[in-house]
Image: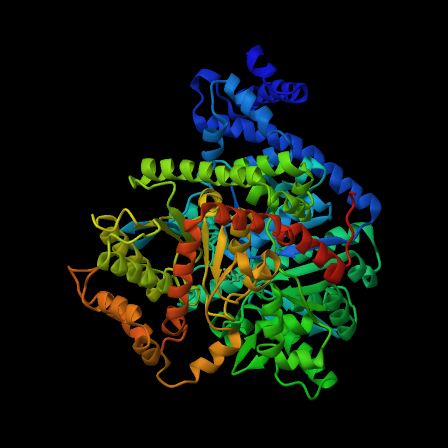
Amino acid sequence: MTQTLHAVPAGDAIDATALKADVLKHLTFTIGRAPEDAALGDWRMALSFAVRDRITESWLASERAAREAGAKRVYYLSLEFLIGRLLEDALVNLGLAEAAEVALRDLGLALGEVVADEPDAALGNGGLGRLAACFMESLATIGCPAIGYGIRYEHGLFRQQFEHGRQVELPELWLEQQHPWEFERPGSRLRVGFGGHVHQVEGRTIWHPAEEVEAEAFDTPIVGWEGQWANPLRLWSARAVYPFDLNRFNHGDFRGAAEPEALARTISRVLYPDDTTDEGKALRLKQEYFFVAASLADILCRFERDFDDLALLPEKVAIQLNDTHPAVAGPELVRLLHDERGVEFSRAVEIARGCLSYTNHTLLPEALESWSEGLFGHLLPRHLEIIERIDAEHYGAHPDRPGSIFEHGEIQMGTLSFVMAHKVNGVSALHTELMKETVFEGLHQVHPDRIVNQTNGVTPRRWLKSCNAALSDLITETIGAGWVRDLSQLERLEPHLGDGAFINRYAAAKRANKAVFSNWLAGDYGLKVDPDAMFDAQIKRIHEYKRQHLNILQTIAAWQAIHDDPQADWTPRLKIFGGKAAPGYHFAKDIIRLINDVAARLNADPVTSKYLQVIFLPNYNVSLAERIIPASDLSEQISTAGKEASGTGNMKFALNGALTIGTLDGANVEIREQVGPENFFLFGMTAAEVTARRAVPDHARRAIEGSAPLARALGALRDGTFSPDEPGRYHGIADNIAGGDHFLVASDFAAYHAAQTDVSRAYGDRETWARMAARNTARSGWFSSDRTIRGYMGEIWGAAPLID
Ligand code: F58
């Protein structure tokens, strides 16, 4: 035992001893298990509690400091927080990773196994939710007093399995075991009402909801780098006001007795329920209002504890709406100020606007949220009236404005959010400009200073330091450890890029990650791959605009070309796919099945499989991304230009030394600017060219006539090459591409195919490739979410950090 402790620096030895004692204490007194009976999960729980104790100290001190300073607080309202695992993150940020390793080794355990036992908290769908999680970590690292508000879904994003290549959705059960990070707050339950009617009493408007539920808070402290600051993520859980109807029970109606509780709990049961039914739609709106109402009540309660003048609200409170899902915060805040506190209506709107700001994450028309007036008025009658008045006042002030909040009997939540926010931001430079030219064109003309850009970022603690030890150790040895807090310091790697020895070490770090990944693939999926092959990854939600079908079509073309000339000098590649399709999105599910069918055929091909293999890893989540990204050479960012608002996976890959093959879309544009065009494989039409091309009749047919490889690859979809048991299975995809081809797969194919050939050639020169990869790392400092958060603090929130 002493020997192990001597292997680490003295400080860590002390930490390790203390940590070990705390782990044993929690195992005994919190978990109630003797060491000899403890399972892996018990140890993980005990370690998590020991770590949580340390975070809690920092958190309570942060809360005290914020209060004493009378500081402005940031409230981040998001229906999604895609947190992933927390234990490793917390250990790394507290500087306890090595101590934990030693302490656990002493107890006969491997830290890696303990960490991997934690379920992923998947309380989000994709980029928007993961951005919220990165922001929470950056807010804490910077020392900005903040609270993240969301819903504590019992079931996060579904678990994905493949059955005969098809996606099957299973419920996700992260709360099946105790969640050790959270503090339940039974003392701060709040009531949230729905439905009912509105009436006037002595000039005041009173809303009488027909139904009420209780919101119970669960706080998870999120600690920043070096443990200097921690902020809570407060997630609300729904429960019945009267959980149990004793009367009905006593009359033998056991089912009925439990009904109120079951109904109330539905609100926080699942992430983003299917809203194709009217019941589903109503539930989604209920979720939105439920968490907004609870959060705003909480925010005002905190404010009123410290201040007594509501005019100070915009000076002390910044509320960020993560997309339009919390848009009802506008009318709710007005209701709280006007109806419940007597502030004059226009003044209430002005105060609310001073607090609120809104982030837009999509320009896709089908993804812009709207609610029918009927449904909305039924659930939130008073809010409908308030929105009507807000709209009328906005029209009064800007009679020449182009559109109303109400269009075609629907409430446009984007317009409502815009009107109620003092700042509206896009998430990449291109996206922000397109916002001004498209969805918000008219509003932008009326409010030219409202739209600002805050290009997304990712936290370097999780997305480099913890997930890629080989590379982060090399970086620290080369330029010191300052980059972890200030990612712009990565530019100090630049002078080393001409040094062959450094490039060799950089390449060796990537090679080591690839070896680990290959072993894992062989062990868990039985797929043997050559770690020297190029690892080419596209991991993200499955969507037509993201064009996984372009990727797989080009893979088919490459396979056909290898077959034609198997003796040629082909660059071996492994194509990695990962991502979930929305349960009702049939076309996306067909794409998944196609990729799996192609993988089965290609991986079994004795002629080509040494050059080209394909794997679709099931159940893509944060932890899987942490495995894939450090081991990847090529990052596929191939969306139809103008469609991907930003992307954040693209940043993680570049930071970890994968080169991008991509379109001029979202933050790809800025990545290319930063890393240099010579270190980025660009292809495809620009957003303006996309618009022009769509207007060309028959654009897909023309593209197919112009590209023999494309025509041949489509032929393989039609003749049942990948579905011999059902030759027609992929006719739908082929027809889509050859027909309307809204996402211009055919039109961009030839350029993509050519760019992939360039990629293969470039990978042949390993030293040059490694230098290009290292340059990507050195020039990715801009993509830290710390930079993004500082941007929000300065330009949107007017908040200041409370640590240096
Ligand atoms: C994503 N949006 C954007 N939405 O697509 C991506 O470009 C961007 O980088 C990211 O936000 C962060 O700004 C996104 O993830 C969703 O997941 C929706 C949530 C609500 C249901 C429909 C999907």
Say which of 287 and 159 sits in front.
159
Residue sticking out furthest to the bottom: 400
In which image quadrant can residue 66 be found?
top right
The N terminus is located in which quarter? top right
Query: What coloring was used for the rendering?
Result: rainbow
Question: Front-most of 693 and 122?
Answer: 693
Whether residue 144 can be seen here: yes
- Residue toward you, 344 or 85: 85
Percent x, y for residue 481?
67, 37
Relative to 74, is 229 above or below? above
Residue closest to the eye, 353 or 154: 353
Q: Specify the quadrant that holds the C terminus.
A: top right
Res 211 visible? no
Q: How many marks?
A: 0
At x 64%, y 75%, the residue is 387
Outermost residue toward the left in this view: 725
Q: Horizontal and vertical percent for residue 557?
A: 29, 62
Residue drawn 30% across the image and 40% down it:
528
Residue 436 located left or right of residue 569: right
- Quick check: 51 above or below 800? above
Image height check: is 589 above or below 59?
A: below
- Residue 444 vertical position relative to residue 492 in the rendered view, above or below: below
Q: Position of residue 96 (x, y in %)?
A: 62, 29
Where's residue 364, x and y in %? 50, 71
Give the left or right position of residue 133, taking residue 730 as reference: right
Q: Residue at x 52, y 38 (%)?
A: 504
